[in-house]
Image: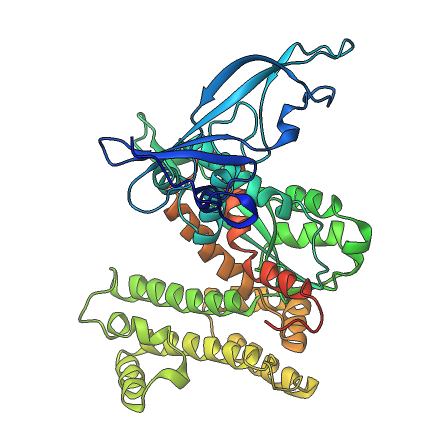
């Protein structure tokens, strides 16, 4: 074994001890093994390591010598293997129930096979790099449970902190895993046997990120989560953005009766597009007696019907319009549904964006009347159902047009949730899934918190 340097470094320490950088341990020698690994022999260099962990009295009675091999962070290409030569002491305090103890340090706790900085770095790597636990375990040569425990220790303290003040809440669901179907052996019909959902509650207008995840998507579970929060925090919530979900609306009415409900405009536009598709499919079946085919003008224009009028070129719009007019009553009915959908989009376009003012009540009333007038002029039941939905949810829709609030952040966090699921190759444990998703969806809040903690006048 090739011995290390014995030259003294800063503060009387050897350069090898300074290079190792583990507080309380001094490097005695460094050698090479046949496989190229560097073996670092270390000894205890901390007086308090001889203090009994039970009573705190320093011991001077040596019982025996012990050798352990804690693992540490990798340095370079070749691995480093620590060999810690330490002492097992006798506790001579008569009232202490402990007979003997082995030296331990904060950097290498008792009965630990890893240094504290290795655990900390492993957990930090999983959290900051958004890597899967198995990848970090392989990098630091630890088991999956050890790497996961390091990640939990790194993130739990911050996730358990009190929620930041929130004015606008967003509530939306995301599916956990995939639905499970089974076939009935008697009827040969498929039925759903498992469909798991999580409901995310987010800061829809600030930097709070994902505030909580609850199992299910019922009014009861969402209302229970809201009731568990401090009353002062609930009093600060002025608006709640949801899709057109009766369950979430009931939860808000029960737990936040003073908050204003806001219907998300994205889901309203999707309802309009679904209405046009339903009209097209029904009219094709009724008038042609079959499903649409490539030669049918309504089937060839199916994607243009779902595209906003302002995004179609004049040539594309002329092809859409002329093709459906030439199809007769079938095409006219579909074009009428398309006009109703575009009238709904014109109404929703009044919502203010950053840099624009709140729309006039007269403009809102005019475009709403135009939408309802077009809907009443057709016999399509799908159009009538859409108009009835708009009327039923009008207070929440109007709140979105006046305030400009939406549930866009919830949709963005749903994308991050799915991305975390792919990184982890799926989750079996719901608690682990919630932890990983919440951590991934609070980065903006952590950056804002770190900026607020900076010392005033500090140069960054």
Determine the residue positioned at 57% across, 66% down: 264
Name the side, left or right, on which 314 lies relative to 215.
left
Name the side, left or right, on which 246 lies relative to 14.
right
Looking at the image, the residue that sits furthest to the left is 295
Looking at the image, the residue that sits furthest to the front is 7
Q: From what the image shows, is residue 52 above or below residue 382?
A: above
Report the number of discs: 0
Quadrant including the N terminus: top left
Q: Is residue 197 among what the camera can see? A: no
Q: From what the image shows, is residue 240 above or below residue 399?
A: above
Determine the residue positioned at 71% across, 11% down: 92
> Residue 29: where, in percent of width, then height?
39, 33
Name the side, left or right, on which 111 lies relative to 98.
left
> Residue 180: where, in percent of width, then height?
38, 36
Determine the residue positioned at 43% across, 49% down: 420
- Asked whether 206 or 267 is in front, the reply is 206
> Residue 182: where, in percent of width, then height?
35, 32
> Residue 300: where, in percent of width, then height?
24, 73
Q: From what the image shows, is residue 111 above or below residue 384?
A: above
Determine the residue positioned at 67% across, 65% down: 454
Name the side, left or right, on which 332 lies relative to 441.
left
Looking at the image, the residue that sits furthest to the bottom is 314
- Asked whether 335 or 440 is in front, the reply is 440
- Asked whether 444 or 195 is in front, the reply is 444
Rendering quarter of residue 38: top left
Quadrant including the C terminus: bottom right
Q: Is residue 61 among what the camera can see? A: yes
Coloration mode: rainbow
């Amino acid at each position: 074994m090739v011995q290390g340097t014995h030259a003294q470094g800063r503060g009387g320490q050897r350069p090898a001890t300074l290079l190792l950088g583990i507080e309380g341990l001094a490097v005695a020698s460094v050698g090479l093994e046949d496989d190229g690994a560097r073996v670092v022999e270390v000894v205890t260099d901390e007086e308090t390591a001889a203090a009994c962990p039970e009573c705190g009295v320093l011991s001077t009675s040596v019982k025996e010598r012990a050798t352990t091999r804690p693992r540490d962070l990798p340095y370079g290409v070749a691995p480093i293997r620590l060999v810690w030569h330490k002492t097992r002491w006798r506790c001579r305090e008569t009232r202490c129930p402990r007979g003997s103890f082995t030296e331990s340090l904060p950097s290498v706790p008792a009965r630990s096979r890893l240094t504290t900085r290795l655990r900390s770095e492993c957990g930090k790597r999983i959290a900051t790099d958004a890597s899967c636990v198995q990848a970090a375990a392989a990098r630091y040569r630890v088991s999956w449970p050890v790497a996961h425990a390091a990640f939990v220790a790194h993130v739990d303290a911050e996730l358990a902190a009190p929620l930041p003040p929130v004015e606008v809440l967003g509530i939306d669901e995301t599916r956990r895993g995939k639905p499970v179907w089974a076939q009935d052996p008697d009827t040969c019909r498929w039925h759903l046997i498992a469909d798991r959902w999580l409901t995310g509650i987010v800061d829809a207008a600030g930097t709070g990120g994902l505030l909580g995840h609850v199992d299910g998507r019922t009014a009861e579970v969402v209302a229970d989560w809201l009731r568990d929060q401090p009353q002062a925090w609930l009093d600060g919530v002025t608006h709640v953005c949801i899709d057109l979900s009766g369950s979430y609306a009931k939860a808000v009415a029960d737990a936040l009766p003073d908050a204003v409900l806001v219907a998300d405009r994205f889901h309203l536009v999707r309802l309009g597009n679904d209405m046009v598709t339903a009209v097209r499919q029904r009219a094709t079946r009724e008038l042609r007696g079959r499903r649409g085919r490539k030669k049918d003008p309504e089937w060839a224009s199916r994607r243009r019907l779902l595209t906003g009028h302002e995004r179609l070129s004049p040539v594309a719009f002329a092809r859409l319009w002329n093709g459906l007019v030439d199809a007769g009553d079938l095409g006219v009915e579909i074009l009428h549904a398309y006009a109703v959908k575009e009238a709904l989009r014109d109404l929703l376009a009044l919502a203010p964006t950053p840099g624009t003012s709140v729309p006039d009540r007269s403009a809102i009333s005019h475009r709403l009347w135009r939408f309802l007038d077009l809907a009443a002029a057709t016999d399509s039941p799908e159009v009538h159902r859409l108009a009835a939905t708009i009327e039923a949810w009008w207070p929440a829709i109007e709140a979105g047009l006046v305030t400009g609030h939406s549930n866009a952040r919830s949709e963005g966090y749903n994308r991050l949730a799915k991305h975390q699921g792919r990184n982890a190759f799926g989750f079996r444990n719901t608690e682990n899934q919630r932890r990983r998703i919440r951590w991934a969806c609070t980065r903006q809040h952590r950056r804002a918190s770190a900026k607020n903690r900076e010392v005033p006048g500090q140069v960054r």
